[in-house]
Image: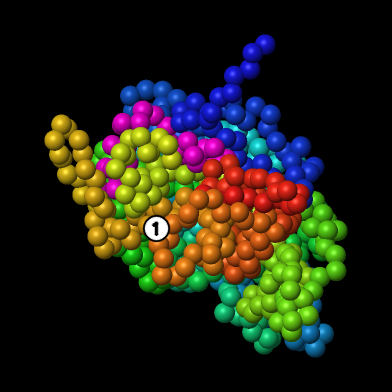
Amino acid sequence: MKLEAVIPFLGKYRPFVGRCCQTCTPKSWESLFHRSIMDLGFCNVILVKEENTRFRGWLVRRLCYFLWSMEQHIPPCQDDSQKILESFGVQSVISERAGGSELTSSMKKEVQHILGHIQAPCYSFLLRIFSWLMLRFLNCLFLNVQLHKGQMKMVHKAMQAGSPLVLLCTHKSLLDGILLPFVLFSQGLGVLRVAWDPRICSPTLRSLLRKLGGIFLPIETLSLDSSEGVLTRAVVHAVVEQLLVSGQPLLIFLEEPPGVQGPRMSALGQAWLGLVIQAVQLGIIPDAMLVPVATTYDMVPDAPSDEYRALAPLGLWTGALAILRSLRGWGGSHRACVRVHLAQPFSLQEYTSNARSCWGSRQTLEQLLQPIVLGQCTAVPDTEKEQEWISVTGPFLALKEEDQLLVRRLSHHVLNASVASAAVMSTTIMATLLLFKHPKLLGEFSWLTEETLLRGFDVGFSGQLRYLVQHTLSLLRAQVTLLRIHQGDLLVVPRPGPGRTHLARLSAELLPAFLSEAVGACAVRGLLAGRVPPEGPWELQGIELLSQNELYRQILLLLHLLPQDLLLLQPCQSSYCYCQEVLDRLIQCGLLIAEESQALWSSCSSF
């Protein structure tokens, strides 16, 4: 039998993304995988027709959205306030404050007051009306909302195991908090509890979101050592424990909201994840299934074309005006697409046990770098991200140092899986080509798409190339200028100022696919900078021989210099393994050629 090598290309072959880590969770990697995942294809979540209801007829075709919303199954919502009040942690704090006396009515009111700021009972009729409005709103705003059926099969399989689902998501838009609950609610996962950031919502909007399933963490009291802060922490622990025991799925954002300057990882999201880990460690629940989630947009609806607005609390009327503005600006034939990505679920208990068994003797960054500073050692140590041992403040005050390390490693691990499973959209590829001045957009668009697929990243589009490029340019019409030239050719020029800034923000979504090559190219340039005279032209004269040890050292220095929120390296992966991966990528793309010198030392040649 003759075998023919086929290169993946647009519209025919797509790489499979979303498998969990085989090193940290081998049992989940084998048992929670759907064998026929690639044969199931995609579905448009917001495409609801007459066939999606039990009824048929002329009137049903016009009321299918409303009938579909009324037929969705909503599990009965139980009031757990009494169970939370009777929980061991809350009773212990109250008994300490009351001196061992019985529970008074004032203490009950205080606990109820704290509980009212965290969550509220869900109303079935309000959820159905909200689902109907969301269905109409999303159909007006987006062309489609795509979801892979095979990924949904894996989540349903994990849900059948009996453990509660904890979905850990990226945060690309403020719309994520209502889009993801609607998508998963329509797929039969029930009412999704969303851990919202209280800083981005006004009190009125928080009250509405709590009735729709939102929960809020009062971080202003968790960081205090007063008696009120201790009682609030006990109530929050009891809320999370009751939520997990009841089996309700929980959605946590591991990234900061869009527009926030600073680190990428959210301290608030890690605090929620720490509460889940503590519930498993204390035996409240035997296990929890973690699902990395990512949402990608052609164009983010709440992102202005010039720059992100200052992060101010979003009010109810402000949100309504933003929706109307989005419908007016995004309506018509040029609507964007959305992809929701659900990576393979894995067991939190399995990850925790494997992660702790791999921890050996550790040193702080100060202990590792002190011999180099004093001149006692010249080799750069493999710190393996020991910067994570730096003390933190805020919601982590209630966690032990070892638990903090576990939360941070798990957060980086899950966020790495979410980013790796997120598809690259057509606007991202087009923005990259426009910024780097590629003249032939049709050919270069196809080339960059193939390069993205070859690096194991999926793309969120398909179709004929010419119509796909036309659709992408129509979405970017506010950031580019179209000029018709002779023979029917079209010249695309990025608009200066805010338009170019927005294109740069879009092109940044392509960085994870080419991050290894970027780190390797910076390392090679750093080594060659010492060999080229400062006043001379930056051109290589022939072939330069670079030692593999020198490249390793330079890449390690870059890894220690670059922020960990940008690299998002897996904690189970050694830095030297990543260095070898960087060299392999550079050799694969033709920037380096591996040679073996006469002294049997491995070396690389650079062009």
Residue 417 percent across, percent down from the top left = 62, 50
401 w.r.t. 46: above or below: below
Seen at 47% across and 68% down, the residue is 533
Q: Quadrant of residue 474?
A: top left
Disc 1 residue type? Answer: Arg
Residue 407 percent across, percent down from the top left = 70, 64
552 w.r.t. 13: above or below: below
Residue 212 visible at all: no
Seen from this angle, which residue lies furthest top? 1
- Asked whether residue 450 is drawn in magenta, I would say yes
Seen at 69% across and 79% down, the residue is 391
Q: Which range of residues does the magenta coloring cover?
A: 449-477
Left-right relation of 136 to 544: left
Seen from this angle, which residue lies furthest left? 486
Residue 575 percent across, percent down from the top left = 70, 59
Q: Which residue is mark 1?
A: 505
Residue 270 percent across, percent down from the top left = 64, 66
Residue 387 visible at all: yes
Left-right relation of 76 to 540: right
Seen at 56% across and 54% down, the residue is 544
Secondary structure, mark 1, is helix
Instruction: State which quarter of the image contains the N terminus.
Output: top right
Say which of 25 and 371 sits in front.
371
- Asked whether residue 21 is drawn in magenta, I would say no
